[in-house]
Amino acid sequence: MAIPRLTEIERDDALKGLPGWTLSEDGLAIEIELEFGDFNEAFGFMARVALYADKADHHPEWFNVYNKVRVRLTTHDAGGLSARDVAMAQFIDGIV
């Protein structure tokens, strides 16, 4: 079953409810950079997101250096943003 891509209006509405998240330059993803107290906190955050991602069968693109984690959410099967990305961003916001 195909995963529907958000329309520009749906995408813009979703971003209004996701403070700190920005639209990627290509318009196909949302991104955020988070800073934690140390590597342990950053890694713990990533572990919590990984558990959620496995259950949701939707995995983030991310990059970690010491206490910083950059997250990019997109749905490759939809060719851009989907409701799955919004749900994951909301989960991430809830645990940060």
Image (cartoon, rainbow, N blue to C red):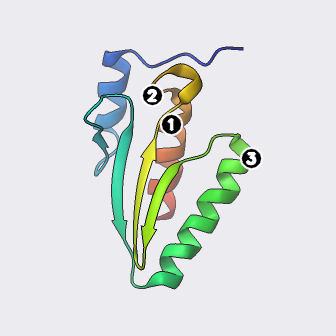
> Which label sits on residue 55?
3
Q: Is disc 2 in contact with disc 1, using a CB cutoff of under 8 Å?
A: yes
State whether residue 52 is above or below residue 81. Answer: below
Q: Position of residue 90 (x, y in %)?
A: 48, 46
Q: Position of residue 78 (x, y in %)?
A: 54, 20
Real-space Cα distance between discs 1 and 3?
A: 14 Å
In the picture, measured across the screen, residue 21 lies left or right of residue 38, that is left
Q: Earlier in the sequence, mark 3 or mark 2?
A: 3
Specify few, some or many for label 3: CA neighbours under 10 Å numbering under 14, 14-19, or 20 or more.
Answer: few
Q: Which residue does the image show at 47% across and 46% down from the upper left?
A: 89
- Quarter of the figure with the N terminus: top right
Nearest the viewer among 20 and 25 is: 25
Q: Please name the residue that numbered disc 2 is placed on.
A: 81
Q: Please name the residue that numbered disc 1 is placed on.
A: 85
* Secondary structure under the numbered disc 3 in the rendered image: helix
Q: Which residue does the image show at 45% across and 68% down from the upper left?
A: 64
Real-space Cα distance between discs 2 and 1?
A: 6 Å
Q: Which residue does the image show at 70% across and 58% down from the upper left?
A: 51
- Quarter of the figure with the C terminus: bottom left
- Identified by mark 2, the residue type is Leu
Q: Which residue does the image show at 37% across and 31% down from the upper left?
A: 14
In the picture, measured across the screen, residue 90 lies left or right of residue 33, that is right
Q: Earlier in the sequence, mark 1 or mark 3?
A: 3
- Identified by mark 1, the residue type is Asp
- Identified by mark 3, the residue type is Lys
In the picture, measured across the screen, residue 40 lies left or right of residue 93, that is right
Q: Position of residue 31 (x, y in %)?
A: 35, 46
* Secondary structure under the numbered disc 2 in the rendered image: loop
Specify few, some or many for label 2: CA neighbours under 10 Å numbering under 14, 14-19, or 20 or more.
Answer: many
